[in-house]
Image (cartoon, rainbow, N blue to C red):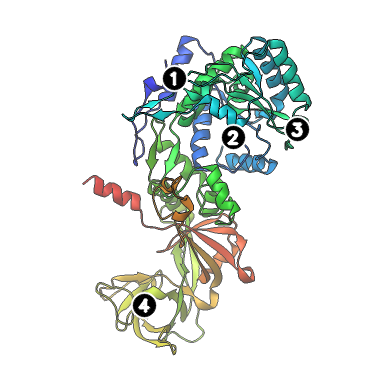
Amino acid sequence: MEAADHAGNSGGSAPGTGTDFISEFIKEDLASGRYTYVHTRFPPEPNGWLHIGHCKAFYIDFTMAERFGGKCNLRFDDTNPEKEDSSYVNAIKRDIKWMGYDWEDREYYASDYYEYLYDLAVKIIKKGRAYVDDLSEDEISEYRGTAVEDKNNITQTPPGRNSPWRDRSVEENLDLFARMRAGEFPDGSKTLRAKIDMASPNLLERDPVMYRIRREHHYRTGSAWCIYPMYDFQHPLSDAKEGITHSLCSLEYEIHRPLYDWFIREAGVFPSRQIEFARLNMTRTVMSKRWLLRLVQEKRVSGWDDPRMPTIAGLRRRGYTPEAIRSFVSQVGIAKTDSMVDIAFLEYCLREHLNKTSRRVMAVLRPVKLIIDNWPAGKVEEVEAVNNPEDAGAGMRKIPFSGELWIEGEDFEETPPPKYFRLYPGNSVRLRYAYIVTCTRCEKDAEGRVTAVHADYDPATRGGNAPDNRKVKGTIHWVSAPHAVTLEARLYDYLFTVDRPMDAAPGGDFVNSLNPASLETLPLACGEPCLALAAPEERFQFERLGYFVRDPDTGEGGRPVFNRTVGLRDTWAKMQGKANK
């Protein structure tokens, strides 16, 4: 029974629209006796850092193994020495562990199987099902042919042409393949190809390349090999060697499945089974390691862990939690048809977790001085604040309060617009956790910019209560100026200005959709004294401003840096509310 027979709902921007057809497959395989156990694998290529799309992949791999009492391997498919590096291996392992998954002692490398793979290639040659070809890469492509559209827009695949060397004898092929390994031939001069069907409508089955000559230093095997196996050859045979029952992969590999089965069958090895699922696509970002690498190499971002990147490391540095990412992936579901998920839903999952777990503090991003004229000179009080209203066990904290405070510049208007309930001359507001104050005047510099706001406080309103039942509509946050810690705030926005930046390629260039305002740095923000002691990756809700995380970096003068993770406004919940009306 093919995977397409179990195609789920095609999905859309909303979560939960897919069906878990993979579980049904596995149940059928166990019930039929095809397999007596479940063993999956996550097989990253160490040529970049993992992104959130990979999260879906290894979430499925590890979850399916756990669900059926099986095991999941971590295997690095490292057969492309030009692009691979041990630093990528380390980054991949670090990110998977941070996400909460452990492969224990099941860490493998395709490069450890080179001798095994070579022997299987020899076995296939001896069966007359593989041959050494002298065609160049361009000639192979030309002989294979291409799909074309006729006048009715129907795609046709005219038969390809056999290579002149397709009918070499088994003995000659064995000799040439051994000499390829020995390094007798220049790079690109010969390949080993499977002998399948040059007329197949699936172009991948038209005698695919199994081995190519590359004199490239491999990060693990050094210069021991000058021939390297191609992905479609090594992947199924590596799965077979590890006894993988279910090779779960994204939908673009569906067209490769005939090759997967062909190599397993011709090599006579353990019959692993490939099942495809829809990959994760998300608005306002790209999920191609090639494109992400370009952003890094062209310094359009600060690195793989830039908080604007969809990499796991970037999301971690942005302040995302493993719990929020796993919740997102699980609710997106497992479907058989590709769809686009709105990034607002990822942010919704994040807010759901941060709201329950993040300590509240007050910080001011664009500070303006508030002077309380009738406050006793030199007096400092402590007011009590709730650490997290969603967590009774989080307790309370004490905050210093004085006659000089920092407030947000936008919380004062000399001439307020309609329905403005914050500070303006003659208006009263609550200072969060403290007192009600009434604005009296402001000071300006020579350019007319407000440099200080003056107010009087009402001593009878400690805690923000109004005993005379006066109506005070506005509440603003603040930080005591003498006690404030200066910090650098980095306000991150979406990396791209459009939902589908990938649509700019190939006719255009996806970098043209980069958001020039994706990062705003505020070097003179300030916050409560406790923020000076915040540990890297410690998360907070800056009241009225959003969720922030302490960055490993330090700013100018050793100032702590805080990245804005996400704002408080829940656009996904708002969209869903409108949809349900």
| Circle nearer the N terminus (2, 3) | 2
Name the residue that disc number 2 marks. 44
In which quadrant will I find the N terminus?
top left
| Circle nearer the N terminus (3, 4) | 3
- The CA distance from mark 2 to mark 1 is 23 Å
- The CA distance from mark 4 to mark 2 is 53 Å
Name the amino acid type tagged 4: Phe
| Circle nearer the N terminus (4, 1) | 1
| Circle nearer the N terminus (2, 1) | 1
Coordinates of residue 578 in the picture (x, y in percent): 25, 49
Q: How busy is the neighbourhood of tag 1: few (under 14 within 10 Å), some, or many (20 plus)? A: some
Tag of residue 221: 3
Left or right: residue 305 versus residue 569 is right
Q: SS for tag 1?
A: helix
| Circle nearer the N terminus (3, 1) | 1
Q: Is residue 304 above or below residue 210?
A: below
Coordinates of residue 32 in the picture (x, y in percent): 46, 10
Name the residue that disc number 1 marks. 25
Name the residue that disc number 4 marks. 412
